[in-house]
Image: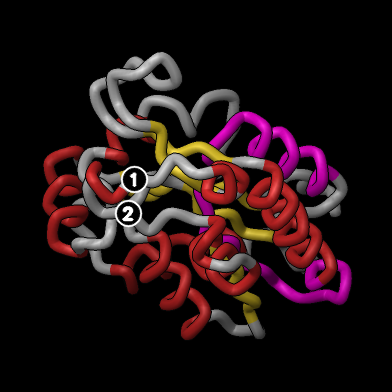
Amino acid sequence: MSNAIILLHGTSSTGKTSTARTLQNIYPTPLIYLSLDTWIRQCLSPRFYEPATKLEDVKQDLEVKQGTHFLLPNTPENPLPWPMVSSGKVANDAIEMMYQSAINFYEKGYWVVLDHVLLTPKWRDLFLSMTKDCRRILVKMTCEKNLLAEREKARGDRMPNVYLALLNTIHQDIDYDLTVDTSHITPLQAAQEIMDFSLKPSAGTPSSL
């Protein structure tokens, strides 16, 4: 059976990271883990990303705007009542290199799990374009809204209500192979479901690889 790039895609607090790490532990072959949060923090100085947890911490300087940053709510840039996440050139270039790293591991014969949020249409289109010749399995990670709010509050490292903005945008124009609802299952159960599906020879796109 050919290897694959497994994308775990969903809003913050849907359990992507815990599921991906559990998947690594139970997978029958070495599974390479790549993560948006980890990648950005490894590649970029904190000057280029914005780990803000409340609106008064949001910066508007040029360096932050070249990385990943928040758009304040109720502004011309973002008319929504909650903060939006955006990205600039430095972050976009770093993300492109993360996709290329996933492809490099894949071409060496490794399975790859990508813990990621396709924050912008640019990231979505770039990922789908770059991986078009790879066997890829796109997993939609979901959770009930009330539980997302509880998880977000409990973790304390996210801007409140960002998940609401992401929930309405990030899943557009993506044809998923599998949907996993983590509302009432453990990371182990979620990982087992993904592993069982991914090991089917017909799973993913293109399935003929």
Q: State left or right for residue 73 relative to residue 177.
A: left
Type of amino acid under label 1: Val
Q: Which mark is residue 52?
A: 2
Q: Is residue 122 magenta?
A: yes
Task: Tell me the element at label 1.
Answer: loop
Find numbered disc 2 in the image and state the secondary structure of the residue it sits on.
loop
In the displayed structure, would residue 199 be above or below residue 68? below
Q: Which residues are magenta?
A: 105-132
Q: Is residue 116 magenta?
A: yes
The quarter of the image holding the C terminus is bottom right
Q: Tags 1 and 2 in contact by the CB under 8 Å rule? A: yes
Question: Sequence-wise, which precedes: disc 1 or disc 2?
Answer: 2
The residue beneath circle 1 is 58
Image quadrant holding the N terminus, namely bottom right
Dot 2 amino acid type? Ala
Tell me the CA gap for discs 1 and 2: 6 Å
